[in-house]
Image (cartoon, rainbow, N blue to C red):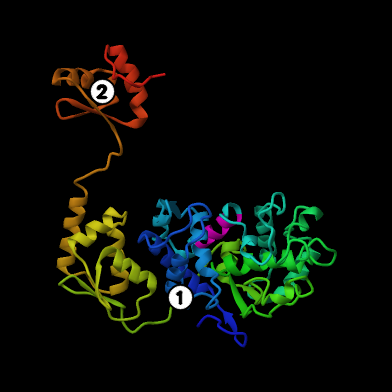
Amino acid sequence: MDPVRDRDERHVRLTESEALANVRTVLELCSAGELRCSDKTNRPTAATIRTIDAHLVHGDFYAEERIAAVAWPLLVQAGGLAKLDGTRLQLAPKGRAALGNPPAETIRHLWQRWLTHAVIDEFSRIEQIKGQRARNVLTAAKPRRQTVAVALADCPPGEWIAADDLFTTMRLDDLSPTIARNEMALWKLYLEDPHHGSLGYAGYHDWTLLEGRYTLAVLFEYAGTLGLIDLDYIHPGGARDDYRGNWGGDFLDALSRYDGLQAIRVNPLGAYAIGLTDTYQPAEPEPVDAPPLKVLPNLDIVATGNVPAADALTLSAYGKQTADRVWTVSATSLLTAIDRGRDLAEFTAFLGRRTGHEPPDTLTTLVADVHSRAGQLTDLGHVRVIECADPATAALIARDRTLRSLCRPIGDRHLAVAPDQELRFRKALIVLGHVVPGRSTT
């Protein structure tokens, strides 16, 4: 299914299966160091958005308005699966573990974490409404998104509900994700011009314009991206006209990129992630004529069938792509994968699932050899190195009953002290009658 490109298109997008594939793809992109975000706002860069869009199953929802490609980096950060190292998004230990877990569990975790640990206020993505950054204007985002989550959980699974019908139900049930702190705050929100376009005027801040748009943002960009709801949507341009009476509104094609959302349906994955069901049974995969990969004795891995984006990224993590459908494994490529935190057991298990045959002896031998080499070195972390004047002094300190547990000999004249043991080491050193000048032990 191609993204919506013009106003004449209407799509019904069944998001469940693509989200289950996309979550692993995004984690693999993090593992490969392909994604970057602002270290101040946590938002993905333009290049990262393009990279994710190119790897998404069926692409983003719209050809020009990025939604899922923006949401995924934010979601994995909020879920603790990835974290920023400078501006580069790196896979966290939880994220590496998630690569081996059922994707439905990962998606449920991401949704639940987003409700309590979101890294942005979703309303900030509605850029046409200005003045949001002014002090004491917006309410706290966490209660707002949790209100939307309650409304979503009230939707009967498997039944389509129109967006406007959902709005009506939310208002009747007093589930309003109130945007402005008070009446005075409404005057600071505006379209186009802070005076003429202020939303504080009576009749110019309808529920659908503020609370409704926020609800659409949470549902479309986050619940939709995670595959919790199927989406019925059109191009946002001209999809809603509730803002047209506002000063400056007639010049806007749409108030938000989410205006085109017409209806939603909670699917089985959504029912599981929201907590309406305790288990999730994925749909039966389409039958395939043959396994998609084959490992040759020369250590080439050849794609003989369709290779999803996530699988291609996994292959590139452990091997070098040498042709359009060929990856070559070597000692260097496997050592590089281990250096980046990958596990050879995960790789062999992955090949077992994708090839349907026993690996050739050449690969088994290579993996065993590389695994052996990787076990010969251990990272003990950072240490402070203390140089002694002579071997006798070093031996005296290293054999002292108190100090021997706080330091480690390096050669015959040096001692290694872990940072968390340094203060105790220095105090015990003074008791022994020695000192390392220049740093206080108090």
Q: In the visual, does 6 lie left or right of 286?
A: right
Q: Which residues are magenta?
A: 107-115
User: Of all residues shown, which one is farthest toward the right?
Assistant: 202
Label 1 secondary element = loop
Residue 282 visible here: no
Magenta stretch encompasses residue 327: no
Q: Nearer the viewer, mark 2 or mark 1?
A: 1
Query: Relative to 404, is 368 above or below?
Result: below
Residue 22 visible here: yes
- Which residue is under mark 2? 404
**Location of the C terminus (image quadrant):** top left
Q: Quick one: label 2 or label 1, which is nearer the N terminus? A: 1
Query: Relative to 351, is 285 above or below?
Result: below
User: Of all residues shown, which one is farthest toward the bottom?
Assistant: 8
CA neighbours of label 1 inside 10 A, class few (<14), some (14 to 19), many (20+): many
Q: In the visual, does 4 lie left or right of 396?
A: right
Amino acid type, residue under disc 1 in the picture = Val
| Identity of the residue drawn at 47% across and 67% down | 49
- Which residue is under mark 1? 57
Tag count:
2
Quadrant of residue 12 within the rendered picture? bottom right
Q: In the visual, does 52 lie left or right of 166?
A: left
C-alpha gap between disc 2 and disc 1: 57 Å
What secondary structure characterizes most of the magenta part? Answer: helix
Q: Position of residue 120 (x, y in %)?
A: 58, 56
| Identity of the residue drawn at 35% across and 80% down | 306
Q: Nearer the viewer, residue 350 or 48?
A: 48
Magenta stretch encompasses residue 114: yes
Q: Position of residue 114 (x, y in %)?
A: 57, 57
Query: Relative to 369, is 363 above or below?
Result: below
